Amino acid sequence: MSHHHHDNNHHHHHHESNTQLSFEDKMVTLTEHWKNHNLDHAVSYREWAEKAKENNMPAISAILEQVADMTLEINKKFEQAASLIKKG
């Protein structure tokens, strides 16, 4: 199964040609991107968990719900990283 993103601006970064982001700014931008990307996945996992439940797969549904929860926990780490970078 292929991996598709429905965000038309995905991976398109527009910067003025003379503007260079600092390493710290790049890291904050990346952590925010990864967090948003994970959120998209968590939503998808929950949708498929519901479909699995509707199709008599309660164990699969429960696993996908756990995966969604774990994904959101990962996002907390990205938030921590971004916060530490911003504190400098």
Image (tube, helix red, strand yellow):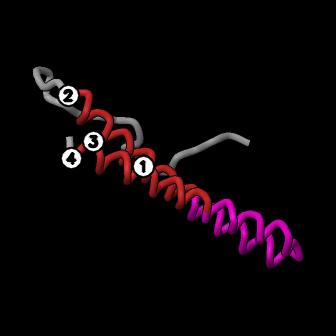
- What residue would you read off at disc 2? 22
4, 84: nearer the viewer: 84
Mark 2–mark 1 distance (CA, rounded to whole Å): 18 Å
Specify which label sits upstream in the sequence, 1 or 3: 1
Q: Is residue 71 left or right of residue 2?
A: left
Q: Is residue 32 above or below residue 12?
A: below
The rendered magenta stretch, by its main secondary structure, is classed as helix
Specify which label sits upstream in the sequence, 2 or 1: 2
Q: Which residue is depicted at the point 57% across and 61% down?
A: 42
Q: Is residue 56 above or below residue 71?
A: below
**Magenta-highlighted residues:** 42-69
Q: Which mark is nearer the camera, 2 or 4?
A: 4
Specify which label sits upstream in the sequence, 2 or 3: 2
Which of the image's four quarters has the C terminus?
A: top left
Of the numbered discs in the image, which one, if any, rests on residue 78?
Answer: 1
Mark 2–mark 3 distance (CA, rounded to whole Å): 11 Å
Label 4 residue SS: helix
Mark 3–mark 4 distance (CA, rounded to whole Å): 5 Å
Contact between marks 3 and 4 (CB within 8 A): the answer is yes
- What residue would you read off at disc 3? 85
Specify which label sits upstream in the sequence, 4 or 1: 1
Q: Is residue 38 above or below residue 18?
A: below
Of the numbered discs in the image, which one, if any, rests on residue 21?
Answer: none
Label 2 residue SS: loop
- What residue would you read off at disc 4? 87
Q: Which residue is depicted at the point 23% across and 34% down?
A: 14
Q: Is residue 28 left or right of residue 38?
A: left
Q: Which residue is depicted at the point 57% across and 55% down?
A: 41
Q: Amino acid at mark 3?
A: Ile
